[in-house]
Structure formats: C-alpha cells, structure tokens
Amino acid sequence: MVSRREFIEQHGATCSNWNWSWSFVNHEKRFVIFGIWQDGHAEKVGLILHKHWETSPKGRKNNGYGQAIEHIRLIEQEGYGLKTFPMVGAARNPDEGELSASQITYITPELTDARLIVLPDGWYASHADDDFETIPEAVDEEFWEGESFKVVVNGYERNPDARRKCIEHFGAHCQACRVDFGKTYGPLGQGYIHVHHIKPIHECGGAYQVDPATDLIPVCANCHAMIHRRAIPLTVQELRAIMQSQLTTIDPHEL
C-alpha cells in the first residue's frame, strides 16, 4: 500500500514537515492538496480545516495549522486549485470531543478536484464536478453523452465538462425563477444548481453530441422537479408562464 508521503510526492507536492503537515502544495502546477476525513459517510461538503484546530484540546499549538492557513491563502488570493483525497482515522478521544486529533488509519490514494467553501467555523471542500442533481435526466471539445449502463434501470452517462460550459454560458442561477443560491446562502450555496437536459437523454437513442448552450439549461431543484411533473417535460418558458400567471392570481392579503 502506498504511503501518504509517496502518494503526495507522486503528484509533485510537498510540505514543511511530513510528520505534522495536514496540507501540501505543488507550486509548479499551482494547486493545494488537503485530506478529507471520511467519518462514517460521505458528505457533499467535506471539512478540510476547522478553526478549532489551531490548538489541541489540551492547549498545545498544532504545527500544521499555520501551514494550512497559508495554503488556504494560496487558493483564495493566488488562484491555486484545490484537490482532496479521502482519509480514515482511528476513533477520536471521547474526552476531547469530535474535533480532536485522530491518527490516520489509511488513505485512498485518489485526488479529486474540489471547490473551496468558507463557512463561519472553517473551510470545506465540495467536489468541483458535483452536479447536485437528484432527477435522473441529465460533455473533449465535442460533447457526447447517453451511453447507457446497467444498474436496476438504465442510467445515462453525463460529461461534467458540458455542465461547466452550460453554467459558464448562463451563470449559476435558475433560468426559470432566477434564484441564485450563492446570493441567498453565501459560499455554502455558491455554484449549487441543477442542469436540465432540454431533450431527455433516454429519447436520444444513445450517445450524441451536446451543445451546452442550446441543449442544457441551469434550473433550481424546485423548478427542475416541476418541469418533470408532466410526462412530456415542460419547457422553461412554459414554467415561467405558469409562475407569472400565479403572480396575477395571488391575494395580496396572503403575502
């Protein structure tokens, strides 16, 4: 089994001290690596650095904290990328709380591109290609998708590049109701949006080329669900018209 140091060095990254470092950096390729603790179940957003980790429960300064803060600065101010890998640790000391230090039991030597999320208690990572979708709908500069693979029912492959291109074109807000989760929830909601496939993939007959600006469109989870309430999905324009008609029938006293 590859050691953590061997794994990190394979990716050209280094640190100040291999014994106490929590984070690592590759200055040549401009990215930072953090481990994410896998405590029982995977999260959409994983903790990489907590503000309480500056000192141990016994009041000792944690040497890795200052270096980690510098690596966070490289991401926030210098444009470095963020990559993460899963770690599993031994049981934490119950007398010191769930945020106490834990010895690494093993790591999964796989790097995943991630997005930094800053919350009041610390710094979190969300997978950069996380599409946040729950509706089974929805790309190499030519975007192809739709090859089916067998689960219990047919699922359809999606290329995360198409999602990114779609959001770059439209922005990360709902094209039906205009909600922007970043403006409403701050960093926690930044980039959270579904991407609706205008023509259902299962109707496309296999792999086909996708234009992210005409075949895909960002919508919020609520609007995405409403689009699929009908057997033949509503268009975004039809959904807008429905919402607009409701605005004209609402009793002002109900507001």
Image (spheres, rainbow, N blue to C red):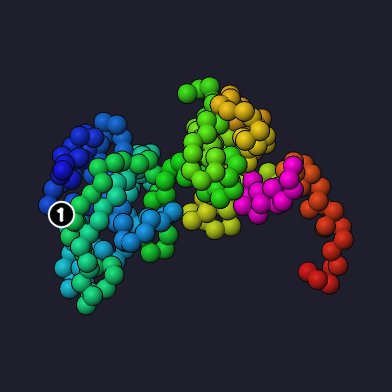
- Compared to 96, does 72 lie above or below? above
**Nearer the observer, 222 or 67:** 222
User: What residue sits 63% from the left and 50% below the top?
Assistant: 220
Residue found 37% across the figure and 40% down from its top: 113
The answer to which image quadrant residue 250 occupies is bottom right
The vertical placement of 175 against 140, above or below, is: below
Secondary element under disc 1, as helix, strand or loop, is: loop
From the top left corner, tell me how far across and down residue 38 is, in percent.
31, 56
Query: Which residue is pictured at 47% across the width and 23% down the height?
Result: 140
Magenta-colored stretch includes residue 98: no
* Left or right: 223, with 127 as reference point: right
- The reply to whether residue 184 is in sight is yes
Give the residues in magenta.
Answer: 219-232
Percent coordinates x, y for residue 165 in the rendering: 55, 32
The picture places residue 48, in percent across and down from the top left corner, at 32, 55
- Report if residue 220 lies within the magenta region: yes
Counting the numbered discs, the total is: 1
Q: Quadrant of residue 96?
A: bottom left
Residue that label 1 marks:
20
The x and y percentages for residue 2 are: 16, 41
The three-letter amino acid code for the residue at tag 1 is Trp
Where is the C terminus found, in terms of image quarters?
bottom right
The quadrant of the rendering that contains the N terminus is top left
The residue nearer to you, when weighing 60 against 154, is 154
Res 68 visible: no
